[in-house]
Amino acid sequence: MQERLIHFIWQNLLFSTGNLFGMDGERIQIIHRGFINSHAGPDFTNAKIKMDETLWAGNVEIHIKSGDWIKHGHTSDKSYDNTILHVCWESDGPVYRTDGTKIACLVLQDKVDHSLLDKYYALLSSPNEIPCSSLIHKIDDFTWNNWQERLVAERLEHKTENIFIALKQLNNDWNEVFYRLIARSFGLTINTEPFETLARMLPFKFLTRHRKNPLQIESLIFGVSGFLNQEREDLYPQQLNTEYAFLKKKYGLKELDYSEWKFLRLMPANFPSIRLAQFAALIHLPDNIFSHCIEIHSFQTYAKYLKIKLNPYWNTHYLFDQPATKREKNIGETLIYQIILNTIVPFQFAYGIYKDDQSIKQNALDMLLNCKPENNAIVRKWAEIGIISKNSWQTQALLQLKNEYCSKKRCVECQIGFKLLKNEAI
């Protein structure tokens, strides 16, 4: 037995409630089960329970065995003194408040339909990555849509939490936080960490002072990245070296170790040298990149915004001093897509919360609705069982569902699991 299942059973009253008696023989009538407490203290608050002829108002605590009350130290914890009912799966003895008064105990073991337990343990023991994969098609569209809305909101709330933590650390500087987050996006997966380190070592305020001079922007980015720590043959990197030598001294800059950048198994177009050049081109744009982020309404709008030209040197190079076949290195659709999902949408949503502006938050959600579905291992796993996504809003919901519920076997906290366990699926 798991305590989360007992919570689920109590919250939804999934047991025989018509003829209840406590361990001491008192008649129990549940007027209100209480509200889930997500903070420290008893599991359910503001419950109303009638015992014999007396109506009690207070809290409900839940355990597998009644003795867990003692194991968890509640006997000496005054925050549990307002507990009016102790709900357990089985009893192994009475429990008391700090003043020595006994707490009524309701044992559920013989009051729950065992078919519910069988379904629950079948989900927990399922070898499938998605435990309810054979049953999920019984879920009605209304439940699916409502649950996906909640999952997308959860995912965005988690991402915005990190944004607000960063804002607090950086004195509410939205530009600096946005700059750091978008730098991570340019690293994709394999070079996320060095890009993030670069953004920390090279503050955005330094770059903005040189926005009108692309060579200086490029020298700062390539210099702090560690790409200029050796003699170069071509004129362009030599010019970058000259500029960086002056700016390094001016700002007291330090460099990353070049070995932190990963090239192995990357297509040349994804080399960090190309991504750094593209990042420099973005910083050089005349618009404030954060302000522009808030105004973006579609993938197409941002794709047009990012149609920026790199220094012509990169048309014939992927690395310094190594000529290659001529090809423009524009920011591609995949990178734009990742920036929108991982930076633009979370930032719009966070800014909407900050400004208490529902229209900004809705715009972030609309962008997900208007973006094509993601293509990754988790989305493909859902597709294998017939759950096909039409847009990024749906794939973001499925990622949240798989990572936070299916993988953690939180079936009783999932609306799909709730329906299946309650036999409400149609």
Image (cartoon, helix red, strand yellow):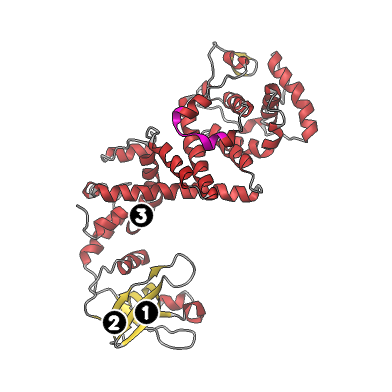
Q: CB of mark 1 within 8 Å of CB of mark 3?
A: no
- Give me the residue at 62% from left, 39% from top: 175
Which x, y percent locates residue 399? 39, 43
| Residue 339 shown left or right of residue 386 in the figure | right
As helix, strand or loop, the secondary structure at mark 3 comes to loop
**Above or below, 257 relative to 140:** above
Q: Rounded to the nearest whole Å, what is the CA distance between mark 1 and mark 3?
A: 28 Å
Which x, y percent locates residue 115? 20, 63
Q: Badge 1: how crowded within 10 Å, few (<14), some, or many (20+)?
A: many
Report if residue 354 is visible in the image.
Answer: yes
Q: Does the magenta stretch mainly form a helix, a strand or a loop?
A: helix
| Residue 44 shown left or right of residue 20 in the figure | right
Report if residue 125 is visible in the image.
Answer: no
Which x, y percent locates residue 264? 53, 27
- Give me the residue at 26% from left, 49% from top: 142
| Residue bearing mark 3 | 409
| Residue bearing mark 1 | 85
| Residue 353 shown left or right of residue 175 in the figure | left
Q: Rounded to the nearest whole Å, what is the CA distance between mark 2 and mark 3?
A: 33 Å
Among the two numbered marks 2 and 3 on one chain, the one whose residue lies closer to the N terminus: 2
Q: CB of mark 1 within 8 Å of CB of mark 2?
A: yes
Which region of the structure is painted magenta?
292-300
Number of the front mark, 2 or 3? 2
Image disc number at residue 28: 2
Q: Nearer the viewer, residue 114 or 215?
A: 215
Q: CB of mark 2 within 8 Å of CB of mark 3?
A: no
- Give me the residue at 43% from left, 43% from top: 362
Which x, y percent locates residue 177? 61, 42
- Residue type at the position of mark 2: Ile
- Residue type at the position of mark 1: Leu
Among the two numbered marks 1 and 2 on one chain, the one whose residue lies closer to the N terminus: 2
